[in-house]
Image (cartoon, rainbow, N blue to C red):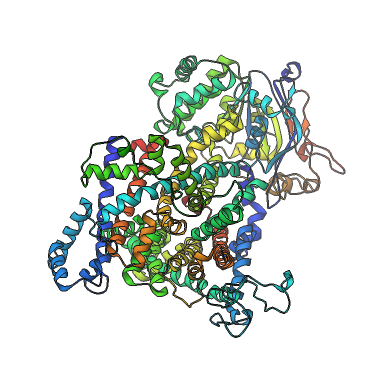
Amino acid sequence: MIQYTIRRLLLAIPVIFGILLVTFTLSRMIPGEPCKAMLGEKATAQVCEQFTKQYGLDKPIPVQFAIFMGNMLRGDFGESIRFSRPVTLILIERLPTTIELGIFALLIACVIGIPAGILSAMKRNSPLDVVVMVISNIGVSMPVYWLGLMLAYFFALVLKDTFLWLPPTGRLTAGITSIPFFQLWNFPYISGTFSHYMLQFFSNFLIFNSIITGDWKVLGDSIKHLILPAMALGTIPMAIIARMTRSSMLEVLKQDYIRTAKAKGLQRNLVILKHALRNAMLPIITIIGLEVGILFAGALLTETIFGLSGVGRILYEAITARDYPIIQAFTVVIAIGYVFINLLVDLSYVFIDPRIRLE
Amino acid sequence: MMENTKPSLLEVQNLVTYYYTDEGVVKAVDGVDFKVYPGEIIGLVGESGCGKSVTSLSIMGLIESPGKIVNGKINFLERNLLELGESEMQNVRGAQISMIFQQPQSSLNPVFTIGSQIEEVFQIHGKISKNEAADKAIELLKLVGIPDAVKKTHAYPHEMSGGQAQRVMIAMALALSPKLLIADEPTTALDVTIQAQILNLLADLRRKFNTSVILITHDLGVIAEMADRVAIMYAGKIIEQSDVQSLFDHPKHPYTRGLIASVPVMGEIKESLDTIPGNVPNLIDLPIGCRFSTRCNAREEYQLEICNKQEPELQRNQKSGHEVRCWLYQDGEGHTAPFKL
Amino acid sequence: MTANSSTINGNAVKDYRSNSLWRLTLRRILRQRSAIIGMVILGFLLVVAIFADVIAPYSPYQVLIGVEDVNKRQAPCIHLLGCPADQPQHIMGIDGNVRDEFSRIIHGTRVSLFVGFSTVGVAIIIGTLLGAIAGYAGGWLDNLIMRFLDVLLAFPSLLLAITIVSVLGKGLQNALLAIAIVSIPSYARVVRASVLSVKETAYVSASRALGGNHAHILFGRILPNAIAPLIVRGTLGIGTAILDAAALSFIGLGAQPPLAEWGQMLGSERNQVFTAPHLVFYPGIAIMLTVLSFNLLGDGLRDAIDPRLRSAE
């Protein structure tokens, strides 16, 4: 197991190297001077010269790449043109919202998608199966931002005066504020240090923060604000997961060992939940891992629509403002995060399928 | 005769199982009758696609859509299995009738240990503690000749050879001393040397547990060695049935004769092995008359015209109990059989 | 088992034997319900795209100020549904620049179909070349190409496309280029896999023994085997490409106004969802319908041509 983990980790290194290489190459492909691309058009000649020196842009390309890689791996993503702040600080501020949104969306997708797929496979060709498949076919064909807008219209406007009303924008209702746990409990910290940033990072997970501080009002309000975006973001993965679960289950139900389980006298439902599901899980988990990538891209669109200040929304603003340091940093962070999630998926195989342990 | 005096354990009467596919109705089993007596091994022989496996799955109640049992009775211990509800049938499966399959390795669930899969049988059919079940699993593994049984309970199917996996399947099948074991081509996927070991094990255990066995195979050699009685199937019907001695000494049906002639005999020198010309007919669109008529050389030899007009009935020799379904032994409208059964 | 093997034998085969493989495949495709529904929708969309000028009551760029008595973002007026007959009919309403939304949706079909076919076409050509070279040459060249494609796959595809466009500069052309680039790896993989699977088979060896040159073996013997999986992947890929292109246009990186592109139309009116929902609703439905048709067709083709692909998805 440890050996397998180490081997998988080692295999991720060239991929991460490749990601940095591609991002670096892209950053050098921006038309015009790199200094202007990174500092904005307003940069003076003097500032430019300093910047060129600082990042070694006058040095040969391989040296430039080495410097770039060093900076990225140290977490120094440069300074945002638009916000004039270190990109790393913006990440600390914004990433938790996106992660919470992503987890919530994925939760919705799995909790509905997997059982729907199982039922669909169990009752193949029944009306239920047809309905699930029609819905999931439509689900995978929908633009996520359109679904988001439609949900906002429906829940915030059509259901305005009912108890089903949901807020269409923002993370918290105006007037409600979340108190970071480290301030509430008077953690000693020095402003601007690494530990301070980490405390900030974790307290920015509003759901997590409100649970550990017992602030139920904030918890309820923040969940309420996440429902619509998570529904919008989770629908496509839900449809894909349902389809994958169905086809994977159908594949497994054809196997010889399913017949054996039935021949033993096992109940039909147990045959499916015990013998079939575990075997069907591998492709389902793989697709869930791949969906995380789609979620990140989808977060950009959903956060923009629902006014959530996560990394997606700031990426959108950065794109509009041609704030390349932010675009570059987020691309690297999300791609590397994606690599690690797929690494986790690979590792989870070991717990599901004993055949993988030997390899 | 033996058959007439003893009560049967299983009696299949006019079993009809069809598959309703897009291409048409596949008549996989089309009126099969046979009996299984306590403690005997009956061989069910035929080419692939003749309905052997569908017959056994019908007995187990494991026919899946688009398949359907259309007609017949399966009497087992004075109950018609086809009239049982699903939960009653679950009590029969694995406890009173169990089954082993052709591909032992893929018949075991790859994600569970050998031990847990054997223990499961006990847990399904009786209230038994986990420890007791584990002990019994080890006992069974020893019984079927798995070396290092205690350790092997923690092994996974992919860590076993085909022969070992089939031993595990046998252990699982015999865990609750069933009255009837259906072995569907249990040795086809195994090496020749392993085949003999598995067959010996089956023969031993059959005696120990006094279990009746339906042995499904296409290998007449296996039948000659193992079976007490044998039924030959062709295109969804039984075309000949008798005790093993009689069948090999006096094969009646041209198909049976062809099958026996196509088995290589040790020590005999032949230019080439005999084969039966043609293929099994399409079960959606069966030939009119005798199902074997399209491939039958006796029909041409004896110039029988009735063969592709009308289907022959199963004729029985009252003395020997030998049964055959062929116009060579049956008189019909304007047709006199060239042979007496 | 019995049922399946027996249908392959005997008469069932005899019926088909005289037909070509393509007719057999076509027959299987026509048995797939989803493929038929997909084809019907797609056929409808193609007709709409071809005859857009005839179907659309207005030019997609015609501003109706002073031409008709309509207001900016006016709700749909359909005479059949009770809209007074003295008002001009606009079945999908009026957009933010006082143009007929319906005409713009109709003309958007052209853009979307063009986007889908062109990006996937380019991606298939480049992907096939890369995959064929990698699979056929093997060795370090294979390694180099495949590792590079692995890196591209390590990025979430839409995100990489966004980054590429933000480097190249916004515009439909760059967006299409970016989408083509990010979809190359999946086609290259499909081709490489089928090249590897037939490279060592008897008929390829025979062709080699007979002195066939590399290009002939590769294009004449090996690549035809890749066509079926490529068609399936490509059809599903068109759906994804249209969806991605619309997303890029939605955030302002793709098609620029005044071009009638659904994603762009939706994006420019997104803040009006509460006041003029029709301007958000219709473009989205149009995108969904188009993507759905390719997905259904792709699924049906996959089931008909190569059921094994299903588990590989």
Above or below — where is B218 with respect to B317?
Answer: below
Q: Residue furthest right?
A: B334
The count of marks equals: 0
- Most foreground residue, B300 or C34: C34
Name the spot of residue C178 as percent of width and height, x first. 38, 68
Name the spot of residue A292 as percent of width and height, x first. 41, 50
Q: Residue furthest bottom?
A: C67
Query: Can the viewer see residue C7 in this picture?
Result: yes
Name the spot of residue C208 as percent of width and height, x first. 36, 65
- Most foreground residue, B26 or A288: A288
Query: Can the viewer see residue B278 in this picture?
Result: no
- Most foreground residue, A169 or A260: A169
Name the spot of residue B139 as percent of width and height, x first. 46, 15
Quarter of the image with the N terminus of chain C in it: top right
User: Would residue A63 be found to the left or right of residue B94 on screen?
Assistant: left
User: Would residue B15 be found to the left or right of residue C28 on screen?
Assistant: right
- Choose top left, top right, bottom left or bottom right for residue B91: top right
Which residue does the image show at 51% across and 27% down from the upper left?
B169
User: Would residue C70 be found to the left or right of residue C126 on screen?
Assistant: right
